[in-house]
Structures are given as structure tokens and as C-alpha cells.
Amino acid sequence: MIRTYIKACLLIFSFMLSACGGNTVTKSPVILDAESDMNNGLQAFADADWSSAQSFFSRALSLYEGIDSQKGILYSHINLAEVGLSVGNYQATQLHLERAGIIAKNVEFQDYQPRITLLLAQSILQQQDYVQAEKILQALLPEFNELIPVNTPDTIQLTAIASRTRIAFAQQQDESKWTQRYAQALTKSDSNSVALESRLLRFQAELLRREQHFRDAESHLQRALTGYKAISSRADIAATLAELGCLSAQGHWQDAQGYFIRSNKVFSYIGDIDAIINNTKLLIRVELQLGNLERCNSLTKRLTEIQKEHLQEVEK
């Protein structure tokens, strides 16, 4: 889900700074190198090239530490936490958030605390500790008058509502209420975030699916998919394709097969092994329904290999 929303928070750097008098101040080579690494890291992150993003952000961190730039160090730790979250390295995420949190205690950097809190909540949410994630999100959620937020929510609050809605679905409790709250919050904020709008469509699609309004659910998911493709949000594209596969597995087996295969290709690109394993299990069931026994055997063999490789990687 992720992530989905991270791109909206990424920090963009410029190379030159204009002084109050209109004169251009040239930055030192160290600052220029650090900002170049940061920009390269942001681009790599946007391209889901996690390894390169981590390398660039780490190098920027080292340069900023070398000149004691607290702001640069803070930015670097936050972005490294986001990389850790994207690859499921929760230990690294926790470490960078702790270090960012220490700096954010300073008055001049306190505005970054909500973002740090949000990343912590999302990290715990991805580890399926829903109770703890809900507790952390409480500090970020706006006040509601039943379904309508009292004040206009900002991006961090909207993202927190989206995460809280995800918890509602995971716990199968108050899903409709939180989906409506999410919709009302987006309307009140007049948000133009494609990612946030697309996430709402996916929540609404799940409610429609449960009510067996399959065509409407598919329409919502297709609209979400179009939105995610417009912003090249790979993780969300893959997740939506998988949801279309699950929806099609109501008897439209050929469609389900295509969606799961397409989803796996995107998950493979971003290296989400857990999602690939889950998708492959679902694809095997679909292939059985289609009577493709040879294909089932091949997928089962490949699934065993993936699980073994993944276990070995985790144990390292």
C-alpha cells in the first residue's frame, strides 16, 4: 500500500538558492553532491529500483553527516525508512525512523513528526499488527462528525484514514463506515491525488464484491488500475491486477488467469516475493479449473523453488 502514498511525500531538491536580495548563492561541492545523490535516489525510488535508491540515499546521508546538516540527515533517514518499508526490511525502517525521530524533536523540524509517525504505523500495518498500527494512527486521524471530518484533512491525515480503512477490512469490522469516512475526507479536502482516489476505488470495489455487484466492482478496479498506471505506481498496479484476478475467479477463469500472470510480472519487477508466492498459489487453482494439469505441475514446482529460495534469503 505502500505504498502507495510515499511518492506524494518525496522531497525534491534544487541546485541553486536565491538570496533575499536576488543574488544567486552557489552551494558548496559537498552540498551539490549530496543533493545530486538525493535526487538520483528519488528517481530510483520512483522507478521501484530499491537497491539503487538505498545506495543513493545512504551516500547522501554520509555526505550530510560529514557537514552536520541536520535537515539533510533527517531527509535521508526518512527516505531510507521508506526504502526499507518498500522492500519489507522492517528492522531498517525502524532504525531510520528512530534516528529521524530524534532530529524531529527539535522545534525547527517538528513538522516532520507526523510523517515519521505515519511511516511507523504503515510499517507495523504491513507486519499485520493491526491493533498496534491502529493505536499509532490515532494521533494522525482527524476528528469526525459521524462520517464527515470536522476540519479539512491534509495529505498525511488522508493517508492515515486510508491506512485505518485498510485495518477495518483486515479486521472485518466497520469497513463500510471507514470507506465512507475516507470518501468524505477526500471530497472535503478537494484532493487531486490519483493514488488516494484509486485506493478509495479499491475499497469500494471490495464492498461491491461482497454484495455480489461484480460488474460494478470490476468497473471500480479498472478505474483504479487506470489511475495507478497514469502515475506508474507499480506496487499498486500489481495489487489491483491481483484483485481483478480474485474478482474474476467467480467463474471467469480465463480472465483470472490473465490478471494473475500480469500481476506476477509486475511483482517480479519490484521484487515482492511474498506477493508472487500468494499470486502463484491462486494461479495454480485457476489453472486447475481450466484443466491445465501440465501447467499446474510446472507452477507447483516453481512455487516450491521460490519458497525455498525465499526462506534461505530470510535466514541469511
Image (cartoon, rainbow, N blue to C red):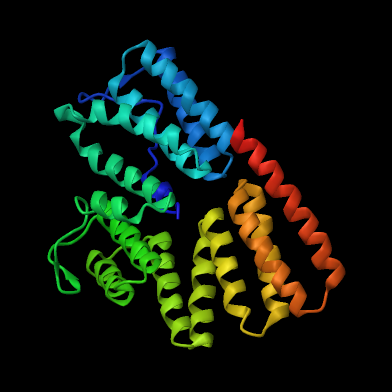
Quadrant (top left/top right/bottom left/bottom right) for the N terminus: bottom left
For the question of whether residue 232 can be seen, the reply is no
Q: Residue at x 49, y 65 (%)?
A: 227
Query: In the rendered view, would you say 41 is above or below 68?
Result: below
For the question of whether residue 206 can be seen, the reply is yes
In terms of depth relative to the viewer, which is nearer, 208 or 8? 208
Q: Is residue 250 left or right of residue 94?
A: right
In terms of depth relative to the viewer, which is nearer, 192 or 215? 215
Q: Position of residue 176 (x, y in %)?
A: 31, 77
Query: In the rendered view, would you say 293 is above or below 63?
Result: below
Quadrant (top left/top right/bottom left/bottom right) for the C terminus: top right
In terms of depth relative to the viewer, which is nearer, 71 or 87? 87
Q: Is residue 128 left or right of residue 109?
A: right
> Which quarter of the picture shows residue 65?
top left
In the image as oriented, which residue stretches furthest toward the top? 66
Query: In the rendered view, would you say 167 is above or below 173?
Result: above
Q: Is residue 248 left or right of residue 6?
A: right
Q: Position of residue 187 (x, y in %)?
A: 27, 70
Q: Residue at x 41, y 26 (%)?
A: 15
